[in-house]
Amino acid sequence: MARKPDPEVDVRIKRAATTLIFTKGLDFTMDEVAEAASVGRASVFRRYATKRDLLLDALGSAMDAKVAMPDTGSFAGDLRVVVTETMEAWKAMGPAARQMYGEAGRDPGVAEILREAMRSRMARSWEIYDNALARGEVREDADLWLLSDMFVGVVVYRGLLEKELPTVEAVVEALLHGFAPH
């Protein structure tokens, strides 16, 4: 009779793959995953037929990180927190972030994970927009998806090109007031 797969081994394998993504980028091997998870190579391949299968599962988990939504009492304060966390998340990913976005151009599965992760995070953060609307800090007709895309976009764009990120204050100022004179 075949043994039932150990769920703890599943967790260790996925955790090892996620850690390798953050430390090495996408250039890890299945053997490195097995070693990091303290399991045999066969345990990894029993769960994932290919590295791509493992990569997609690990990326999905890594990108689904739950972010606490701030309630500082002001839209500017909430934006500062969210923009700071977005920049810190990019920096924490290091070269892996650039690799993931490059891979997204070649692999629709990776592209879908990134797309879903970004939209999911913004949907979870909608509370800060609702609060800002209730306080009268944002126009009723404001395109808040565009606002979200603007701050995520600048982080990703500059990160991909390895350009220095702007300050959190500069991003929040531009989001709230644009570039018109004060």
Image (cartoon, rainbow, N blue to C red):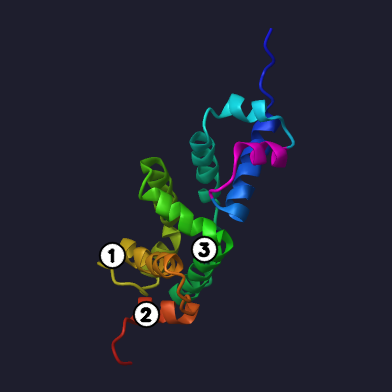
182 or 43, nearer to the observer:
43
Three-letter code, disc 2: Ala
Q: Is residue 10 shown above or below 78? A: above
Question: Where's residue 42, x and y in %?
Answer: 65, 26
User: Where does the C terminus fall, quadrant-wise?
Assistant: bottom left
Q: Is residue 48 shown above or below 79? A: above
Reading the chain from its start, which is encountered first: label 2 or label 3? 3
Which residue is denoted by mark 1 in the rendering?
A: 143
Residue in the image at 45% along x and 76% along y: 76
* Quadrant in the picture for residue 37: top right
Residue in the image at 66% along x and 22% along y: 5
Residue 123 makes an appearance in the image = no
82 or 96, nearer to the observer:
96
* Quadrant in the picture for residue 139: bottom left
User: Where does the N terminus fall, quadrant-wise?
Assistant: top right
Give the prevailing secondary structure in the magenta stretch.
helix
Give the CA separation, mark 2 to mark 3.
20 Å
Which residue is denoted by mark 3 in the rendering?
A: 90
**Which label sits in the foreground, 2 or 3?**
3
Which residue is denoted by mark 2 in the rendering?
A: 174
Question: Where's residue 22, x and y in %?
Answer: 59, 54
Q: Residue furthest left?
A: 141
Residue in the image at 38% along x and 47% along y: 111
